[in-house]
Amino acid sequence: MANTPLTAFIVAYVLSLLARLGLRRLNITHLQRHGHVVPEVFRGRIQPEKLSRMRDYTVATTSLGSLAILVADIAALALVLSGFLPFLAASQILTGLHPVASGLAFIFVCSVILGLLDVPFDLYDTFVIERRFGFSTITFRLWLKDLVKTFCLTCVLMGAILAVFLALIHALPGMWWIPAWAAFALFQLLVTWLYPSLIAPLFNTFKPVQDESLRGRIHSLIEKAGFRLKGLYTMDASTRSRHSNAYFTGIGRSKRIVLFDTLLATHTADEIEAVLAHELGHLKLGHIRKQLALSVIISLAALYAASRLLSWPPLYEAFGFSGPVPYAGLFLLAVAMRPLSLILTPAASLMSRRFERQADVFAWRLTGASAPLAQALKRLAEENLANLHPHPLYAWFYYSHPPIVGRIETLERMGEAPAGP
């Protein structure tokens, strides 16, 4: 009986690893086979040399990502199978602490061990691959500052919610998952609300759009969409990378739309207006609220399952513990979520792509034409060296946005929009 959870864990981990690596390999093989063909919608814009560069960039980043996945999964398996976890839990330092403090220290040590393995890959990606392809502009000093800030912020935020979970487990062994779910839902709402005004400014500088002509067009567009949105900002993305993008974030009064300064520097006013209309579509259609609601529902099911498993002795016996240690159980379940989350990935991707299509239609109706957004997406694809030939299965499984070629083809078929937003 004690070997059943361990066997299931190892099998799930190995299968998920093979699936993720297999999908990535399938995508690269497909790209190498078809990546020399310029799609019809890019004819006259992309020359063979540029197409080759786009292909090479995808191959380089995917190959590094595959190696990072392999190392991370092997390290996680080694950590939970080596006997280190029961050794750490039984150490005199942890056994002399309050259960909440013991749990925080235990999870901190294990998380740092696994997290440190990501650092070399991030370094190589930032200062070798991204620099080779002309994207990275960040200095090592700024990269190090970002790393330290991210580490501290993660410790504060994750430490806070974990402390609540551990305290509830200690105080309410049988029913802790109900108040924990309420606390997690509030935590998600709080972080989403605070992110634009408190968290994001720790890493970037945000300023109102300065161009008077563009700002006038943007405010007219916002009013046409039926909003009184004050949070329209440009972000100093160029201090770290030449990649360009835009995004919508926040809830309630913290809502804001952010345009990368690299986007403003390289796109026409019509294209920027179209990108903004797309982001307004996410706001108008309540996509962030829907994603938060779904996350809350999933977290309820996950916490209930966790409450049942944390009181199940075979879980601990399988990994070398003599009896239940709830904080160790939480960490084991978090590690096990890596292969389990693979099952939910296609559904999340499908929902996200649906939202993106809806936002494209909204932008088309709001601006009265689809050509500016199509042109903006073409320019973004060129600038960011996007993969123009993803394997359909890989795109279905992972892509949060519709594949760029099909998305542009859809927009070009739309043409002029009917009257009215």
Image (tube, rainbow, N blue to C red):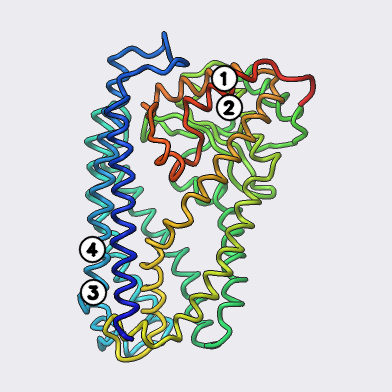
Q: Nearer the viewer, mark 3 or mark 2?
A: 3
Earlier along the polypeptide chain: callout 3 or callout 2? 3
Q: State the CA–CA distance, disc 1 to disc 2.
A: 6 Å
Residue 75: give its label. 4
Cβ atoms under marks 1 and 2 closer than 8 Å: yes
Q: Residues within 10 Å of mark 3 (few under 14, many from 20)?
A: some
Q: Position of residue 155 (x, y in %)?
A: 40, 64
**Amino acid carrying mark 3 in the image:** Leu
Residue 313: give its label. none
Q: Inspect this view and state whether residue 86 appears.
A: yes
Residue appearing at x 59%, y 22% in the figure: 411
**Amino acid carrying mark 1 in the image:** Glu
Q: Residues within 10 Å of mark 2 (few under 14, many from 20)?
A: many
In the displayed structure image, the side of residue 90 where residue 257 appears, left or right: right
Q: State the CA–CA distance, disc 3 to disc 2.
A: 48 Å
The secondary element bearing badge 4 is classed as helix
